[in-house]
Image (cartoon, grey):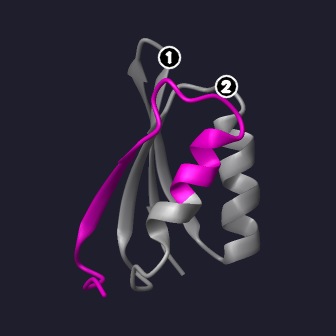
Amino acid sequence: MTKPSDTHQIDAVGLVCPLPVLRFKKRVQGLAGGTLVEFLADDPTARKDLQALCDIAGHRIEWVREEGAGVIRYCISLA
């Protein structure tokens, strides 16, 4: 079990739907609520899919930043 103060990074760059959100879902299992996760993806559908997953799971997207070359960095606070 991780401490909520830990920040994790999940790299899904190069993966296409539905793999980015599936990778996110698998990698956050067992992480404590309040843990921050930085998620990187370049699939255009990842934003919509990630938002839907967060809505269902109760996670909160804190911020979204474009990194360049089509890569988007999301910071998610886990429920």
The N terminus is located in which quarter? bottom left
Of the numbered discs 1 and 2, the one sitting upstream in the chain is 2
Above or below 48: residue 61: below
Q: Is mark 1 on a helix, strand or loop?
A: loop
Between 15 and 53, which is closer to the camera in this rendering?
Answer: 15
Q: Is residue 30 left or right of residue 18?
A: left
Q: Does the image show residue 48?
A: yes
State yes or no: residue 19 in magenta.
yes
Question: How many numbered dots are placed on residues in this image?
Answer: 2
Amino acid type for the residue under numbered disc 2: Pro
Between 10 and 33, the one lying in front of the other is 10
**Going by the picture, which residue comes out furthest to the top?**
69
The percent position of residue 72, horizontal first and vertical second, equals 48, 31
User: Of residues 17 and 51, which is closer to you in this image?
Assistant: 17
Asked which quadrant contains residue 7, the reply is bottom left
Disc 2 designates what residue?
Answer: 44
Q: Give the range drawn in magenta.
A: 1-24
Quadrant position of the C terminus in the picture:
bottom right
Q: How far apart are marks 1 and 2 (CA)?
A: 8 Å
Residue 45 inside the magenta-drawn segment: no
Which residue is rendered at x = 76% and y = 71% of the image? 56
Depicted 18 relative to depicted 31: above or below: above
Q: Which residue is drawn at 49% across and 75% down?
A: 29
Image mark for residue 30: none
Residue 5 as seen in the image, left or right of residue 76: left
Q: What residue type is labelled 1?
A: Gly
Residue under numbered circle 1 = 70
User: Are circles 1 and 2 on residues that touch, CB within 8 Å?
Assistant: yes
- Residue at 47% of width from left, 50% of height from top? 63
Residue drawn 63% across the image and 41% down it? 19
* Residue 18 percent across, percent down from the top left: 71, 40
Is residue 77 something that shows in the picture? no
